[in-house]
Amino acid sequence: NFTTASRRAVVVLATVLFMISINFLIRRTGTEFATAASEETMTNASETNEDQKSESKNKKSQGPSRVSKDQLFQCEKKDDSGEEEGEEEQRWSDRSLPTSSAVSLFNCDLPDALCNYYYPANFFDEECGLGKEFAHFVREAESKRLNGTLWNFMPSIGFPTLTMDNVCMEEGVTPVKQRLRGQNKLSEKVLTNIGKRTNEDTGETCMTERLSFLHVHKAGGTSLHSVFNHINSFPNTTLARHKFFTPSRKPGTAINENRIYSLAQESLRHATKYPSSEFAPQEHVVFAAVRDPVERFISSIGQAMGANGSGHNGIAPVLKEECIKSTSRETLTCLAKYVRDHGFWIELHFTPQVIDISFTTLGTDVPIAMFSFKELTTILDNFGRPKAHGRDGSTDNYRTSPVLRNMTVADYDEESLQIVCQIYEMDVRMQRSLGMEVPRCDPFVPKKFNVQN
């Protein structure tokens, strides 16, 4: 009995020890597994956190793309210098020229200048330009010009060049000079003692400079034409009109190059930044004013829908039938959608300003002294004509409908504003590159580019 009891006790004891050992092993294994899992989780979390920090750091360091003040990204220029012919071309913006200190509103080198130089050929450079994805519109404009389908029935395109050789103006006095036949040509005289100054003896304002202005439609062009015509009534002035393109009255009629077109090309070869000491023969400074595209679109609507000067454009009856609504807001939204869906080519005044400028400069590489439309009165006052505003869209006899005459930027809603900002994104980019903000378009045209001065 004792032996049997002893054996039973040994078995029980062995069983207990076995169970204790198994339990210990399970606990130890579980602890090690949990520790390993915890360590792995912590490692993965740490790695993920480091990846996120690295990604965030990279995004922060990348930021918006940097673009030069000359409307160019940092990229290699395509080798199109013509080295085989022994010639070497250089961008206008790359030319090394002395900084001009001549006193003139059109000298963008001055510390307090109201203008900045803009280079349309840089902007539309298909390799490096700030507006490179819009360059196809420049080619399309030229194609339409050649096949006779560009802006049919609409105003002529060109640029006037005014030479002033010590032209002095007394406020309120407009002398009349004798008109000479054959005067419509570019002066080849060297101009010295350039800029604007006051005659100490008479108190008159005197100017010596040669200027061309680009008529950017719905940005003060009519007013500037009026001023140039006024100044041309003074002695010692010469006005040349390079009206190189008259839209066809028969859509589809091919355009042949003509003498005026060639003269305009030749003239643009002499375009320059403001000189330091003198204007060489035919040398001239080209300037333009550009407008906030949101404000300009409203002015464009009034013009395109049959305002003075556009009554026979062919598209006005269509736009009126389609979009004249009971309120200005509804009319504005309808027209924004119509231009988006049918394209801005339907009417000259809907054309983006950068396309307008590039076309008028014949796609050449020229510097343009660019002003904000906000400075229009200052430009007019520079020529002694601060009130020479050509058109007022709010007058009863200008726009054809009350909903057009009463239309303002307050009539935009979010939808119409987004449409207009996206149609004119190229204008928004150009103006930002020149330090002109377009705040209403900020929510719809992100600031992807920082201008590097």
Image: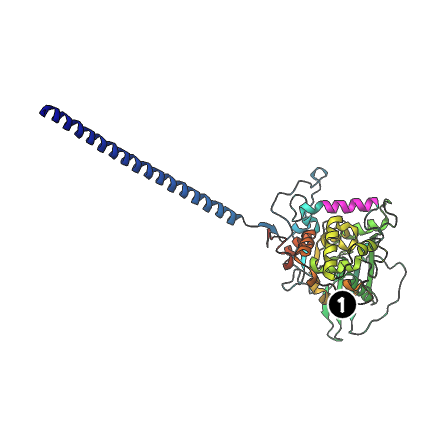
Label 1 Cα neighbours within 10 Å, binned few <14 / some 14-19 / many ≥20: some
Location of the C terminus (image quadrant): bottom right
The residue located at (82%, 71%) in the rendering is: 174
Compare residues 425 and 254 and report the one nearer the observer: 425
- Residue type, numbered disc 1: Phe
Location of the N terminus (image quadrant): top left
Decide whether the magenta segment is chiefly helix, strand or loop: helix
The residue at which mark 1 appears reads as 383
Numbered range of the magenta stretch: 136-147
Q: Secondary structure at mark 1?
A: loop
Residue 76 is at least partly visible in this image = yes
Residue 418 spot, x, y in % from top left: 66, 54
Indicate whether residue 112 is drawn in magenta.
no
Indicate whether residue 138 is drawn in magenta.
yes
The number of discs equals 1
Snapshot colouring: rainbow
The residue located at (88%, 48%) in the rendering is: 250
Q: Is 396 situated above or below 10? A: below
The residue located at (35%, 40%) in the rendering is: 38
In the rendered view, does 43 fall on the left or right side of 85? Answer: left
Q: Is 19 situated above or below 234? A: above
